[in-house]
Image (cartoon, grey):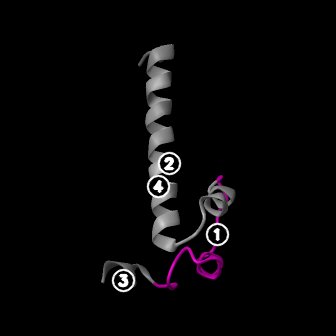
Amino acid sequence: FKAMTEQEKELLQSVIDDTYKQFTQSVAQSRNLPMNTINDWANGKIFTGHQAQALGLIDQVGSLQDAIE
């Protein structure tokens, strides 16, 4: 284990930022929601299944088995 260099920190942060951007763009596109709405929600907030469904983030609330199927 060693402390990360500034260059390593910047590289890791750029990967995190790019992954976050890809994810939020995918959600906005697949759910037909504006990016500003997604950005308002994608800030560490958590939602119950019913809340996510009401917001249009999921189609239905189900079990693990439903997801597998």
**Residue appearing at x 60%, y 75% in the figure:** 52
**Residue appearing at x 48%, y 66% in the figure:** 29
Find the magenta span and give its range. Answer: 43-62
SS at badge 2: helix
SS at badge 1: loop
Residue 31, image x, y percentages: 51, 73
**Residue appearing at x 50%, y 48% in the figure:** 21
Residue under pointer 3? 65
Question: Which is more N-terminal, label 4 or label 1?
Answer: 4
Residue under pointer 4? 23
Quarter that holds the C terminus: bottom left
State the mark number for residue 47: 1
Residue 68: name its quadrant: bottom left
Question: Label 3 near label 2: C-beta < 8 Å?
Answer: no
Looking at the rendered structure, the kind of residue marked 2 is Lys
Question: Label 2 near label 4: C-beta < 8 Å?
Answer: yes
